[in-house]
Image (cartoon, rainbow, N blue to C red):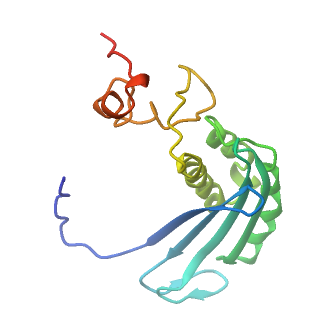
Amino acid sequence: MSMAPLPGERQPVHLRRISCEGYLRDDGLFDIEGLLIDTKPVTLQLVNKAVTAGDSIHQMRVRLTIDRERCILEANVWSEHTPYPDCMEVEASYRKLIGLRIEPGFTREVKRLFRGTLGCTHMTELLPHMASTAFQVMWADGDFNTVDAKGSQQRTSPLGGCHSLRLDGHIVRTYFPKHQKEPEP
């Protein structure tokens, strides 16, 4: 196991926590829930209020309901803590996610739809983490029987999706030999 080098003397300045969870619903659909929380170790004076040390500056949630093909059927966004009341005005615009599919290019489309003042920076930053969680949810059943065609826009298997699961690597050769590929010269 690698050990991180020890840091020098330092003081905490900001803490961002991102949490994503996946749920199988009784109707066979999936809920992917994301939470982003920002705090400071000191009191932060904003133009309209003070946020006490350790209290949430941002505490925002997103819930996406998806099907097995990762198509977004429902999108709910809400803020529990924001620095400004105006932050909540943009929540309804995230309904534009309905009908999108979580696949390669999803993050690029999210950034296009919610760029600048069209969205909330924090909610938009949360969505790629949720997309990754959606893939983990779909792969939780261990379906390694199919491998995506080279250049496929729809990833259905984790095989070929990272360094450890590369098709010409040890793990695939040992545990999924029917999917192994010879290394390219």
Q: Is residue 173 left or right of residue 6?
A: right
- Residue 6 position by quadrant: bottom left
List x then y, in percent, for residue 108. 64, 39
Q: Quadrant of the C terminus?
A: top left
> In the displayed structure, would residue 12 be above or below residue 182?
below
Q: Is residue 159 left or right of residue 78?
A: left
Q: Name the residue furthest top.
A: 185
Residue under the point 64% across and 80% down: 47
Q: Is residue 165 left or right of residue 63?
A: left
Q: Is residue 77 left or right of residue 183?
A: right
- Residue 125 position by quadrant: bottom right
Residue under the point 71% across and 58% down: 64
List x then y, in percent, for residue 160. 44, 30
Closer to the camera in the image, 149 or 46: 149
List x then y, in percent, for residue 95. 82, 55
List x then y, in percent, for residue 167. 39, 25
> In the displayed structure, would residue 91 be above or below residue 112?
below
Closer to the camera in the image, 133 or 157: 157
Closer to the camera in the image, 161 or 5: 161
Residue under the point 41% across and 36% down: 162
Total labels drawn: 0
> In the displayed structure, would residue 86 be above or below residue 156?
below
